[in-house]
Every structure is written in C-alpha cells, then in structure tokens.
C-alpha cells in the first residue's frame, strides 16, 4: 500500500465497480472521481466547497512530490463533488491511487486549511463585488428555491468561512465514505491494459459503440437527493426582479413531473433551454427581440431537479434606454407558456436534432461529454446516464410528449416577488 502525503492509497473496500470508457486513439487519459456529497449536506454554508479546496490541494501536492504528470482540478455542486485529472496514460495508475486517498484525511491539515481559507476569502470577496444583476439573480433563486439546497450559497459568506474549523471539515469528510462514489476512467484500450486491475477493481467497460459489456450496470442513486428538494408538490413558481440599467433577472420551477424515465426528462430539460432562446413565435428570444441587442442578451440555463421538476433561471440584458418593466412583463407572460412555442413537429425535430448533435459533438470520451456523463451517473444512475449519452435515445421523446411535459411550467404559475425587494 503506497502513501501520498499521508493519504492511504489503497482502494476503499466500500467502493463499487469502476466505469471505464474506451476512447478513440488518443494520448490523453481522463479520470473523474464523483463523490455524491455536496452543499446539500452543509451545516455551515461553504463547507463542501472548502473541503473540495483542501483535498484538491493535497492532490496537487501529491502529484508534485511524486512527479505525476498531468493536471488536477475539482468542482463542488449541490449534490456531488468531482475531482478531475487529465494527462498521459502512464500516470493513470498513480493518479487513481491519489484519488483513492481522498477517502481518508491526512494528519497534517492545519497549514493546508489556512492556506485555502485565504484563497477562499479572495474568492468570496470577488463574488460579493459582482454586479447588481448577479445579486438580483441570487435573490430570485433564493425565493423560488426557498427551503432547499439550491437556495444555499455554495461558497458561503465571509462569516461562514471564518466559522468553519478543522473539526467541521473532518466531520463533513465522513460523508465521503459512500459506496455510491464513482470512478470514471476514459482512455484508449492499450492504456487500459496498462492500468493495474487491482487499482480499478471490477470494471464496467463501455466501448465506443456504447454497449455495456457487463450485466452489473448498477444504479448509483445520490443519497444527498431528497434533502429539501421537493419545493412543495403543487404549483409552479416564477420570480423576477428588475435590475436598473441592466434588465431583468428571473427564476422559475415547474410542477412535479410524473414521468418514469429520467433519461427522457433530462433530454426534455435540455430541449427546454434550446427552445427558450430559439427565434420562433412564443419563445423568450422571439418575444424580446426588440428589447435585446442579440440572442446573447438572454442568458438562460435549464436543468432537472432530482425531485423531478424543470427549473429555468437567467438574465435578460436590454438595449440602452430599454424599459425594464416591459421586459419583466414579457418574461412573466412567456416563461409559463413556453410549451406552446412547439407549434409543429418540424420545430420539435429541429430541437431534437440540436440535442442529438450536442452528444455527437461532445461524445462520452471528450472532456465535456465525460463531465455530463458523470453528473448524470452520480445523480440519476449509470443506466440513465449511458442512455442519455446515446443520441438515438432522444427518439423516445415525441413532439406530443414534450409539449405535455413542458405544460407543467403552468400557465397559471404562481408569480412571487423576491425576498428583500419592494
């Protein structure tokens, strides 16, 4: 058993199989470790993000001291934390051992904690110095997602940062010992053959054609999900706020969806985002075309909550001299009725083609494609994620079914004022 800066590098016994993606002929290997623990578990806002910084610091120190090539990075979200490495295949085995070490904490933490506290302080100050539109977007999101993990700040405040001590990080790290953690390795067949099988354990192998060479496709379900995700069971909600001299910030959440197929819902949530900014009657871009300079004047993101609700949030940046009150009225009228913009099957087919092309352009073995695969796998399960990554799976979603799903945004969506505004 090797050690890296105090980490025990042996494969944790509680981990399930690894997922291996066999890539085209490439000299780059990519490794992701998805841990189903995020800010939904925070007792002090920013704890998950703080711990991610500390553990990434140790990864980078280990790589430097052991001459491991490539680069490490990490991200924390509401429901998971992911550690990422890209580099030469010959370093993959050592990288995997470093990542396994993240499930135990080294004894020498204090210096790293204080170094990262200084870095995080600067990060929080930069966020606090953001423009008024960023603060407005935070307010409308906190209003719509009130009482849920999505209403919490990932980074926390300076007061939160100062209150997080070593014992809080050690206690939070106990959540990492989850058998739902997932190691994803993307490399060429020749590189896979060089990685020690004992390092990976049992592996589910996805060749380039997407078929699974194993009957052990286990459903990884994130146990953080369910921590304040439901946002009630009935009405859709919409919050908007005028941002002086900028435009309008908005956030909305749909009614609960009853569809059984998570993969289909994930496709539908992405098509919803494509639809909102398409220049056809009934969409946000179409209805605001006289108020914004271009399509880039509308920033929007759509995603599916684990509790089976669509959610949209974003900003509209208007032309100089625009009337923000008119923009706000259009946003409030348009978002709940986006489904009606799907007035023909040809429009639906165009959107479906765009979604299919997304996966063709960013397949599982690309960096962004692997990230989307890991996010879907760690939240909804490997089987759903693999289905989502196949462009043909979108054929299961019909025009009529998508219109029905998008109607859950609700023409009578409850419109509410953001907290802390008049």
Image (cartoon, rainbow, N blue to C red):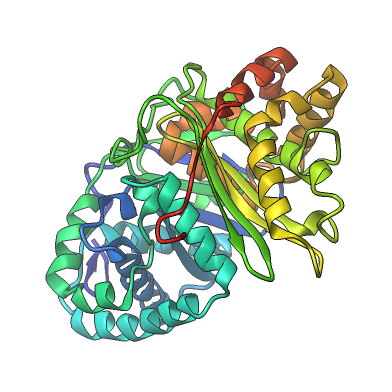
Q: Residue at x 27, y 40 (%)?
A: 179
Q: Is residue 366 left or right of residue 49?
A: right
Q: Residue at x 27, y 75 (%)?
A: 161
Identify whether 97 is placed above or below 365.
Answer: below
- The answer to whether residue 33 shows anywhere in this view is no
Locate residue 267, reporting x and y percent. 63, 30
Which residue is more in the foreground, 276 or 83?
276
Locate residue 293, reporting x and y percent. 85, 61
Which residue is more in the foreground, 259 or 248?
248
Looking at the rendering, which quadrant does residue 378 occupy?
top left
Locate residue 373, reporting x and y percent. 55, 41
Q: Residue at x 48, y 68 (%)?
A: 72
Quadrant of the frame with the N terminus = bottom left
Locate residue 121, reporting x and y percent. 37, 82
Q: Is residue 219 left or right of residue 324?
A: left
Q: Is residue 333 left or right of residue 410?
A: right
Looking at the rendering, which quadrant does residue 145 occupy?
top left
- The answer to whether residue 356 shows anywhere in this view is yes
Q: Residue at x 19, y 82 (%)?
A: 110
Total tally of numbered discs in the picture: 0
Identify whether 400 is placed above or below 208.
Answer: above
């Amino acid at each position: 058993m090797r050690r890296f800066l105090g980490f025990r590098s042996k494969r944790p016994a509680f981990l399930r199989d690894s997922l291996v993606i066999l890539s085209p002929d490439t000299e780059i290997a990519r490794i992701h470790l998805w841990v189903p623990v995020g800010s939904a578990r925070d007792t002090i806002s920013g704890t998950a993000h703080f711990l991610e910084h500390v553990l990434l610091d140790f990864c980078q120190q280990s790589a430097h001291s052991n001459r491991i090539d490539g680069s490490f990075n990490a991200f924390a979200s509401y429901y998971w934390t992911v550690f990422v490495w890209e580099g030469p295949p010959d370093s993959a085995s050592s990288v995997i051992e470093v990542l396994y070490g993240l499930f135990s904490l080294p004894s020498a933490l204090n210096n790293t904690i204080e170094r990262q506290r200084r870095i995080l302080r600067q990060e929080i100050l930069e966020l606090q110095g953001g423009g008024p539109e960023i603060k407005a977007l935070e307010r409308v999101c906190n209003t719509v997602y009130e009482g849920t993990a999505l209403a919490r700040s990932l980074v926390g405040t300076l007061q939160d940062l100062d209150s997080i001590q070593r014992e809080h990080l050690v206690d939070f790290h106990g959540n990492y010992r989850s058998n739902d953690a997932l190691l994803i390795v993307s490399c060429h067949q020749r590189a896979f053959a060089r990685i020690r099988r004992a390092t990976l354990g049992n592996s589910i192998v996805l060749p380039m054609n997407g078929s699974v060479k194993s009957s052990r496709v286990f459903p990884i379900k994130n146990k953080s999900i369910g921590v304040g995700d439901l946002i009630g069971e009935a009405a859709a909600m919409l919050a908007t706020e005028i941002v002086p001299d900028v435009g309008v910030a908005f956030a909305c959440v749909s009614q609960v969806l009853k569809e059984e197929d998570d993969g289909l819902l994930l496709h539908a949530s992405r098509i919803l985002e494509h639809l909102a900014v398409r220049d056809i009657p009934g969409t946000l871009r179409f209805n605001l075309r006289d108020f914004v300079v271009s399509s880039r004047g509308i920033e929007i993101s759509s995603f599916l909550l684990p509790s089976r609700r669509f959610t949209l949030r974003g900003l509209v940046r208007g032309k100089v001299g625009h009337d923000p009150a008119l923009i706000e009225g259009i946003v409030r009228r348009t978002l709940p009725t986006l489904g009606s913009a799907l007035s023909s099957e040809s429009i639906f087919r165009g959107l479906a083609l765009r979604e299919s092309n997304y996966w063709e352009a960013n397949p599982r073995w690309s960096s962004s494609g692997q990230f989307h695969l890991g996010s879907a796998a760690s939240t909804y399960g490997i089987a759903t994620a693999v289905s989502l990554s196949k462009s043909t799976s979108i054929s299961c979603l019909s025009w009529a079914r998508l219109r029905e799903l998008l109607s859950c945004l609700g023409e009578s969506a409850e419109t509410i004022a953001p907290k802390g505004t008049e």
